[in-house]
Image: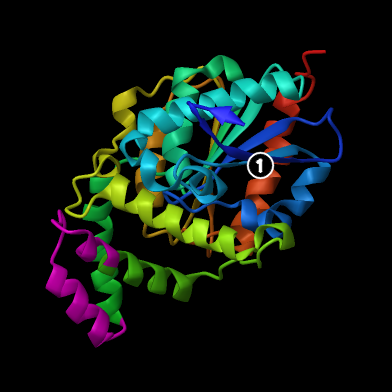
Amino acid sequence: MPIGGIEQWITIHGQDRGNPVVLYLHGGPGNVMSPFADGFFKSWRRHFTLVMWDQRGAGRTYGKTGPSIEPTLTIDRLAQDGIQVAEFLTVHLHQKKIILVGASWGSILGIHMAKARPDLFCAYVGTAQDVNVQGNLAATYPRLLAQARATADQQAISELQEIRAPPWDSLQKMLVYLRWARIYEAKAAPILSYGRSPEYSSVADQANYRGGETLSVWRFLGPNLSGEVMQVDLPALGTDFAIPVFIVQGEYDLRTLPDLAKSYFDRISAPRKQFFLVPKTAHEPSPASWDMLLKVLLEQVRPLCMGVASR
């Protein structure tokens, strides 16, 4: 469908049009969840109408444009795209407001959208909530190095010492850090994973996934880490929210620290807010965190958002 001057891909699944609508903002940047929707979200469809959106520069949306739209890849532009998607959904699905769920990178877009157009949303739910990218790196690097030393992991110690503490001046250094963060998160917590949905597993779809991920990371982080995502500081947008805010964070998350998310949450003023720390869970979805996310949506959010059909 036409969004922000280009064709963008969305999918809508559900069992009952009377259910509240969830717009899920995938992480990354560039890591679409549409290929994995059947596995991750099938149980959601009994209770919600679930909308997946391949953001500008990602997945099947990337497949329509290729890398030509790179100059338009900005946080503001993607947030405006997301608002247009939400506007379309309220009309198409006959809902006055929808539920906004943002994961990791998607949590950055979600906060921008919730602040800009609270009239479109009945609640915001953040998981692996990002807050301040540079502050997070500065806090997690020594923790990661300490974990490597505690296990006498000489390769990890050597590589982390070689890149030194942030701030860094190259994407390559950031990728070294991210690789070890993923390794140590996986040691601490199980990862929930599913195969691709059959209708989203063609050679072209897989190429578009890889191409969109590469383009998005290159654009938003930048080869010298001068990209826009490196300057993210969500508290600077203001901490007053006109809608309920819920945050679900993994205890062992090294990429979006629960400490920073909780500090941000404590500063938030909202009609209603709750913070959920999930034990034995890191950044990636785990069985425990995914169960908690659905539990929060069912028990806390769904009652708030029932009865918002426009006709």
Q: Amino acid at mark 1?
A: Val
Q: Is residue 1 above or below residue 163?
A: above
Q: Is residue 239 magenta?
A: no
Residue bearing mark 1: 296
Q: Residue at x 83, y 44 (%)?
A: 46
Q: Residue at x 59, y 19 (%)?
A: 120
Could you tell me which secondary element the residue under label 1 belongs to?
A: helix
Q: Is residue 274 above or below residue 34?
A: above
Is residue 244 at least partly visible in the picture? no
Q: Main secondary structure of the magenta part?
A: helix
**Quick check: 217 left or right of 95?**
left
Please identify the quarter of the rendering in which residue 23 is found: top right
Q: Is residue 285 above or below residue 307?
A: below
Q: Residue at x 66, y 68 (%)?
A: 195
Please identify the quarter of the rendering in which residue 36 is found: bottom right
How far across and down, in percent of the image, does residue 168 sit?
15, 57
Along the line of sight, the residue nearer the viewer: 195 or 97:
195
**Quick check: 123 left or right of 107?**
right
Residue numbers of the magenta segment:
151-175
Crowding around mark 1 (Cα neighbors within 10 Å: few <14, some 14 to 19, many 20+) is some
How far across and down, in percent of the image, does residue 240 sit?
42, 19
